[in-house]
Structures are given as C-alpha cells and as structure tokens.
Amino acid sequence: MGSSDKPFTAILLIDVSQSTSLKIEQIQDGAIAFVRQMLPQDKAMVVKFDEGVKTLIEFSSDKVALEAAIRKLKFGGGTSLYDAVDETLEKQLSKIEGKKAVVLFTDGVNTTSRRASYESTVSEAVESEAVIFPIYLNTYLDNVGIGGGGGPMQTPPTIGG
C-alpha cells in the first residue's frame, strides 16, 4: 500500500483578525479549494482565530459541511497567531496518528498572543511531526490605504504623469 493511500488529517487554521478582513474571499476560496481536493478517507477540521481560538467544525470528511463552516467566517479584533498555532498543535493534532498537517491562512501579524512566542511555536511545530503549510496573505498595503484600506494612499502611486 503506497503512502498516498493512507488517510490524511488536516486542520485549516484561519486568521480572522481585522487585518485579514479585506482578504475574506481569497481566504475562503483557498480553504474551499483545499477541501475539494481531499480524498474520501481524508478528514479536516476548521479552526478560526483572532484574539481567541474557536473550532468551527470538528474533524470531518463531509465536504459540504466543511465548506459551510468556511463560508460562515466572521472577522474580529487582534491576532493571537502564536497562541492559535500552539493550541492547535498541542490540543488537536497531538492526538492524531498518521499523516497530518496544518494549513495556516494568515498575514503573519501577531499582536495579542499571551501564552506562546515565535520560539515556542516553532519548537512545538517541530515536535508535532505535522507538516505546516503557511498560506501568506499580504495585507500590508490594504491596511495602509492602497487597495481601499482607508489609509493615506487610496490608489497605487503612478510614475510620470
């Protein structure tokens, strides 16, 4: 039996902090694309985080239910990125045997983690033996104004003119 025949377990860990709110459609589309590629024996869990961490759907192979959970995402306040990754690895993925992964949708900004640090999160990730796929969303320009973020620059700069 090849390794591709073994069930795969994934946690879709989705940053719903205020800084990612302008990327909601990209986040949802990416997470749903992942779900649609799952094989029948694969399972996924959807977890959202801002200042806190909340499971939207427990491990499931039901693609319709997983998609519905992803479409219900609501955006909140600060970003406890390190706490969310640490909690997900420690409380959810540590119990799982076999192939496992975290698919992390985030802009990489951490503003409110209290329990975990960058160093402790990296250490936890190495110990978990899980593959972590970070899906980086560049929200910087959106949040300073370019792209409709309400900052000082409402459009990209033009050269010449």
Image (cartoon, grey):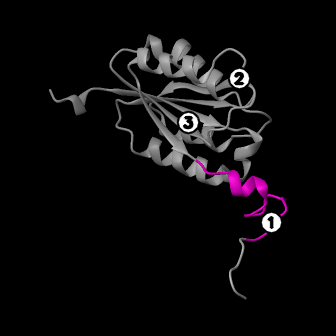
Chain-order first, disc 3 or disc 1? 3
Q: Where is residue 50 in the image (x, y as percent from the top left)?
A: 72, 31
Q: Residue at the location (77% across, 33% down)?
A: 78
- Give yes or no for contact between labels 3 and 1 (Cβ–Cβ under 8 Å): no
* Region in magenta: 137-155
Residue at the left extreme of this rendering: 1
Label of residue 51 in the image: none
By secondary structure, the bulk of the magenta-drawn segment is best described as: loop
Q: Residue at the location (62% across, 25% down)?
A: 82
Residue at the bottom extreme of this rendering: 161
> Which amino acid does the dot numbered 1 rest on?
Met
Of labels 2 and 1, the one closer to you: 1
Side (left or right) of 121 relative to 42: right
Label of residue 153 in the image: 1
Of labels 3 and 1, the one closer to you: 1
Is residue 141 rendered magenta in the image? yes
Taking 124 as reference, is 27 above or below it? below
Task: Name the residue nearer the viewer: 28 or 66.
Answer: 28
Label of residue 65 in the image: 3
> Which amino acid does the dot numbered 2 rest on?
Ser
Q: How many marks?
A: 3
Helix, strand or loop for disc 3: helix
The residue at which mark 2 appears reads as 113
Chain-order first, disc 3 or disc 2? 3
Q: Position of residue 89 (x, y in %)?
A: 51, 18
Q: Where is residue 77 in the image (x, y as percent from the top left)?
A: 80, 35
- Give yes or no for contact between labels 2 and 1 (Cβ–Cβ under 8 Å): no
Side (left or right) of 138 relative to 11: right
Cα separation between marks 3 and 1: 40 Å
Task: Name the residue nearer the viewer: 6 or 15.
Answer: 15
Residue at the front extreme of this rendering: 160
> Which amino acid does the dot numbered 3 rest on?
Ala
